[in-house]
Amino acid sequence: MQLLDGKAVSAHIKAQIKQETEELKAKTGKVPHLAAILVGNNPASETYVGSKVRTCEELGFGSTLLRFDESITEVALLEEIKKLNNDARIDGILVQLPLPKHISDDAVINTIDAGKDVDGFHPVSQGKMVLGQSSYLPATPYGMLLMLEHYGINTSGMHCVVVGRSNIVGTPMSVLMSRNANPGNATVTICHSKTKNLKEICLQADIIVAAIGRPRYITADMVKEGAIVLDVGINRIDDATKKSGSRLVGDVDFDNVAPKCSYITPVPGGVGLMTICGLMKNTLEAAKQHI
């Protein structure tokens, strides 16, 4: 069993991005600039956005963090996004999800200029992805592809089972793994919480992508020997042995599944770090497009 080490891989990719950023600035004077919008004070969202802003600083990007009270209206938030769309200094825009219930995720995503959609959620980005055209890929699936590529894993002809069908991870990952590329060229099955014979399907998988949002949902009896497991889940569970009283686990029962795997991502230290790499690569590309 080999760990797919998100910390090591992300460090390698960020070094490449930083070098490209310095070269871009030297040649054109252009510095990639990411604008992040945070609504409310959700602790997890605070952590994620803080990490993205710090990474921008590390890579030499510019960054703008706009904070709004949870009571902001949808109309007012959409107006703020339109201002960023029209700001030539801004290359990428992300709105941290989840949003308060009175604000439509779709309305927000649709309002972001597709040319600045570095999260890869806009219908134009998703449509181009499905058609195999150049686009900003959703950051988490993109990060997983970068990880597979880094480790030289040839996925051609493999059976990839994606557990979870969200538009952010599961559905785009299923599309990307089936494309004529490497990573890709896999035969893909997409499953979800309503799949009746999930265990039997998972046991056929050469690659399992666990993105269902349930702690330790994928158990050892669902994984065949030698499988590759990519765990997207980030779930906080009670743990009296920890000072905080809790700890993070993935959607995979890591301790029991890992011994059966050829490769597996840990949680934390796996896919989450690669997601930020995908976001930063998209932002750098957006900056190049805006020269």
Image (cartoon, grey):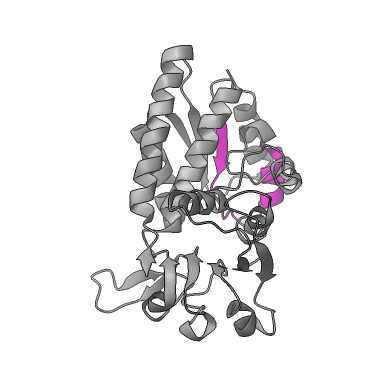
**Could one spot residue 77 in this view of the protein?**
yes
Number of dots carrying numbers:
0
Q: Nearer the viewer, residue 198 or 169?
A: 198
Residue 100 drawn in magenta: yes
Front in this rendered view, residue 110 or 82: 110
Range drawn in magenta: 92-113
Write down the quadrant of residue 237 in the picture.
Answer: bottom left
Quadrant including the N terminus: bottom left
Q: Residue at 62% across / 38% down in the picture? A: 117
Residue 80: image quadrant is top right
User: Is 147 displayed left or right of 7 in the figure?
Assistant: right
Residue at 63% over, 84% down? 200
Residue located at (66% from left, 31% from top):
115
Is residue 68 visible in the rendered structure shown here?
no
Question: Which residue is located at x 72 percent, y 39 percent?
Answer: 133
239 displayed left or right of 120: left
Tell which of 123 and 282 is nearer to you.
Answer: 282
128 in relation to 270, above or below: above
- Residue 80: in magenta span: no
The x, y position of residue 207, in whole percent, is: 55, 67
Q: Quadrant of residue 266?
A: bottom left
Q: Position of residue 245 (x, y in %)?
A: 29, 73
- Quadrant for the C terminus in the image: top right
Residue 154 in percent (x, y) is at: 53, 56
64 sits left or right of 206 in the view? left
Q: Is residue 252 above or below residue 18?
A: below
x then y, percent, for residue 191: 67, 72
Is 44 drawn above or below residue 208 in the view shown?
above
